Image (cartoon, grey):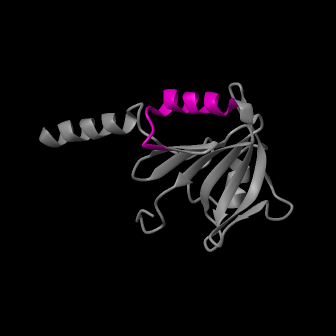
Amino acid sequence: MNRTVWAIAALLLSLSNGDVRADWQFTKWGMSIDQVIAASKGQMARCPRVCGKEGQTESALATGPYSAGKFDFTAFANFDNRTGELVSVKLYLKDPAQGFDLINEMKTKYGEPTSQSDISLSRTVTWRNTQDQIEVSLIYKALVLLEYRNRVNRSNKGL
């Protein structure tokens, strides 16, 4: 009986609205580029070359348009350079003037952020749990980046 109560409590906690689960849309962390493209049903395509290099650890290999409500983005799927596994999805907001509206929508969906920093004309707002992180980076009227990132590696150890 005691096990059943704990199992139900764990299930309810995992389903709570405030839980940040950052696997993005049709993707799951660890997918290959071919799996991401197949799961996107035509929304994402392989970049003709690397769309962008994120330091030494990951590269954007697939891209496509993405819309959510009033927000239009260009999405990039980033893969680990060693394993070829999906580690993050970056969405660049096409209209940077909507940046503060996006942050408010994210707060409505995920609750109060884990952290927020304001430096000069930029703001970074972050939501995270033990496995995932969602971050909005806003450079006033110039760039808005929404990033979904896996915080756990193959050995299930956090960053």
Q: Nearer the viewer, residue 54 or 141?
A: 141
Q: Is residue 151 left or right of residue 38?
A: left
Q: Is residue 150 left or right of residue 18?
A: right
Q: Nearer the viewer, residue 45 or 129?
A: 129
Is residue 28 in sight in this rendering?
no
* Quadrant of image for the N terminus: top left
Residue 100 horizontal/vertical position (percent): 62, 31
User: Residue furthest toward the left?
Assistant: 2
Q: Quadrant of residue 48?
A: bottom right
Q: Nearer the viewer, residue 141 or 47?
A: 141
User: Residue furthest toward the front?
Assistant: 120
Q: Relative to 95, is 30 above or below?
A: below
Q: Quadrant of residue 136?
A: top right
Residue at horizontal 40 percent and vertical 65 percent from the top: 157
Residue at horizontal 50 percent and vertical 31 percent from the top: 107
Residue at horizontal 68 percent and vertical 53 percent from the top: 36
Residue 49 horizontal/vertical position (percent): 84, 64
- Residue stretch in magenta: 98-116
Whether residue 75 appears in magenta in the rendering, the answer is no
Q: Main secondary structure of the magenta part?
A: helix
* Quadrant of image for the C terminus: bottom left
Residue at horizontal 68 percent and vertical 39 percent from the top: 140
